[in-house]
Amino acid sequence: MKRAAHGLICLAVIVSMQSAFASDAIELVDQTGATVRIAQPIDRLASVYGPGTYYVYALGAAERLVAGWFIGMKGIAHASAAMFRFEPRLDTILSFGEPNVEEMVARGVQLILADGSRHAAFSEQMTELGVPVIQYQVETPDALMEAVLLTGRALGPGPLERAHAFVEDYERVLAGVAAAVEHVTPGDRVRVLFLGTDRLQVTSGEMYQTRLIEAAGGISVTAGLLGYWNEVNLEQILLWNPEVILIPPYGPVRPDDLLEDPDWGAIDAVRTGRVHRMPRVIAPMDTPVPESLLGIVWMANLLYPNAVDLDLAAEVEHFYTVYYGFELTEAEREHLSGQ
Amino acid sequence: MRLVADRIHYAYRPGRDVLSDVSLTLDEGRVLFVLGANGSGKTTLLDCLAGVRTPHTGRVTMDGTRLSELKPRNRAGRIGVVPQVHEPVFSYTVGEAVLMGRAPHLGLFSHPGKDDWAAVARALEAVGIAELRTRPYTQISGGERQLVLIARGLVQGAGCLLMDEPAAHLDPHHQHDILHVVRQLASEGYSFVVTSHHPNNALLYANGVVFLADGASIVAGPPDTAIDEGNLRAAYGMDFEIVRGVDGARAVIPRISPQPGAS
Amino acid sequence: MIPPRRATAAILLLIPPILFVAVLLIGRYSVRPDEVFRSLFGLKGSSEILRPLIVRVRLPRALAAACIGANLSVCGAAFQGLFRNPLVDSRILGVSSGAAFGAALALLVSGSAFAVQGSAFAFALLAVGLVVGIGGRFGSTPLVIVIGGILVSALFNALLGLIKHVADPLSHLPAITYWLLGGLGGIRWAILPPLLVISGVGLTFFLLVRWRLNLLTLADPEATALGVRIRPLRILVIAVGTVMVAASVATAGMIGWVGLVVPHVARAWVGPDHKRLIPASAAIGAATLLVLDTIARTALPSEIPLGILTGLIGVPAFFFLFFQFLRERGEAR
């Protein structure tokens, strides 16, 4: 036991000395405010933060990933066929559950991307072992752009260039959608309810989904709620009486479940048939992943079918080709473009 | 009414008899004391007589019928048990506690009615505690609780009551109160089997005595002849002296060698 | 204490129906009382949204709250008597642990309300079946059954921990956590029939046998000497009680404290005789849950888990009652 501890300490000292003396280390401040010193270049990294894994793919550094957490995938059985086309090495890098410190060391990881709200203790342990950790906190579009830039800086010149391009694209989409919904008067803004993995589970005002609805010119009826997912009752939903109900691409809820339920029949969205489930091929677009910019376009078209007509198909093609280097099948292209 | 135990054996574990070859007979209006040291099998004997346990060999009969052949509710209507007083968890009133004795006369889904409450009132009257009916059972004395349990046996309709150490934890006055009620009820035709640690109570209140030693009955008979120095030594493993009072009453006192330097 | 007091009986029997009607008038979607009656009976002037709101949302919820409150309280009272222990409730037999595991398993693999309800119910029965099965081998005394309950609960708690461990922290884990806190937010008519039928049959059973429950509070030999077949009666009470609690937990998740505290309140009011204790527990339990669930669904825009409310109110209530109980027994000043 004692010897093992000694060994661990020696290892930590050696690793930290290496990084301390590396000539071209960079320093950055992550989204928890921690200063992270990262030796360059990074050849092996792990992302224990689900959305963060997709930042690495968007920046073209996928081959350096030795372990990754993928949103909603707890084991290879949860992976779709598209995911295997997206990442042929999926069965070797896919990880889930609580990250394990020793496993990270064993895989020779040089950098870890982590969730700032969940991995504080883990990050401290890894930092003590000399492995730098970037912790993310992304619940707004600005934070997403910052997160992608941070990742780019950590991964080197190539990825950083891609990160800048992504931020430009995201800002262009935001501006385009804002211009398209500009002439919608405040009174005509559509009231949207965003559900979770249960029909009585809704997003809070502090979540990324609410920011996407706002960016698409809608009003989230649950914007006043605090915290994370909230459980509500049907009476409250009747009280909110949303005009559109959106269902995330994960979870068991389907539009027909609500459209065919007489209990929900009195709600405007159900009466007019405006209940929609988000499309998904790779990552869910309502979460703080790069393709959430497509989510904004999809939502804006959906909320204002008469006033807004953005070219979603073109944005989909551009995003998957440029950032993921992923060739969509015809069916996937149609699915994502909402046709 | 005649309760007979005929050469009964009982063992909790095979080969280790707690009762071996015990016989006794209880007739109407009689008070039979079962005397014996701790662990001699008195309570087990009482359980067998009540039909709660069935002897492995031998038989217990009520008016010629084996207890094991009687339906539980019929058996309970003829033989009642007055257990040792214990601290109850819930504070039933005295009336409610006595009323439970009506169980053998009520079906699964029926509730006690006026007649049952009348039986409770009569029984409380008979043991002399009618005024306690609405008092919580948790707030009366040990002696009073013993009377409540006797009253419960009476409303059960049993002619024969089995009492497990009714004198335990009671001062001499309260012991007398209880056993006096027992004698009175016996004169009305009830019969009793009473386990006891007090040979003197047997001399004062019993019609008959059974001595148990290591699960076997060593002697049975009327108290005057059964309680002698030899049987006491055999039952308790120590010496006793029998003394006689001025009015002819006999009493048992332990014979203890004088303490060194006591006089 | 004193044989039935009519006033007490009247109050106890009137409160739940009055509350039942009252809570139908209360909700976040504020409604005027006359509008409620109009929409209930489809009279002129009933608005389009009112009728579904009251008939489809509030009514099934109020029914479920009343049934579950009565079930948990009656079973709590019966089990406290049966185990001769005023500190137990229906959870002593592992019902809740089994149900929690069953629900978590269903939330993990399916998520449909029917699957969750069915699985919670099935595993609740399985847990108690194990306890009674183990107990049966050792004579079914209260001590044996209580120890069996602790062991089986521990087993299912470990299995629940395993499920939580493998559950997705973003989707399944919050659902499991929320279910464990208890609530009636998801109640719809479609999932109500099993609860209504079981509650009706179970409560009727307990009302019929209620006087005989007194005999279960006696020591085993004592009850046997009274001609009571104690083991069959005990097993019957456990079986019916378990099905009632399992149906309640399967429908509403974990709602603690009601089954423990309400019988104490009832006992303080009408005494320990089950002839009055059982109806009083049913009435107070139904009333309690009707009130708490109304708070849970109206106080905030998001649901307040019922288990949190019962704990927040139940713990101080129990604290007070328990020390009152000790004082009565002279074990506290």
Image (cartoon, coloured by chain):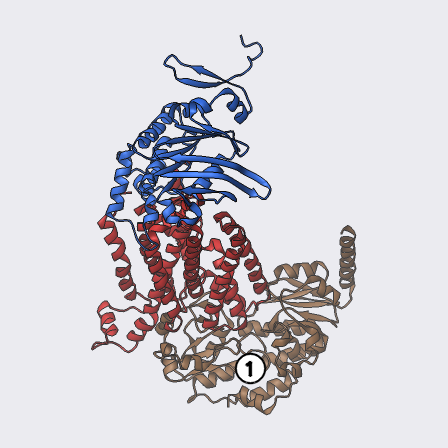
Is residue A45 visible from the viewing direction of this image? yes
Is residue C171 visible from the viewing direction of this image? no
Give the chain ID for the blue colour.
Answer: B
Residue reaching furthest top? B263
Residue at coordinates 47% horizontally, 71% vertically from top-left?
A203
Specify whether C125 is left or right of B15.
left
Q: Position of residue C269 (x, y in %)?
A: 31, 47
Specify whether B248 is left or right of C147.
left
Residue at coordinates 55% horizontally, 43% vertically from top-left?
B12
Q: Residues within 10 Å of mark 1 (few under 14, many from 20)?
A: some
Give the chain ID for the red colour.
Answer: C
Q: Position of residue A251 (x, y in %)?
A: 52, 75
Q: Which residue is mark 1?
A: A280
Q: Chain of mark 1?
A: A
* Residue type indicated by callout 1: Arg
Please tell me the colour of chain A. brown
Classify C154 as above or below A261: above
Specify whether A66 is left or right of C333.
right
Q: Position of residue A215 (x, y in %)?
A: 48, 78
Secondary element at tag 1: loop
- Viewer-side residue, A279 vs C111: C111
Specify whether A79 is left or right of A251.
right
- Viewer-side residue, A150 vs C24: C24
Q: Position of residue C173 (x, y in %)?
A: 54, 66
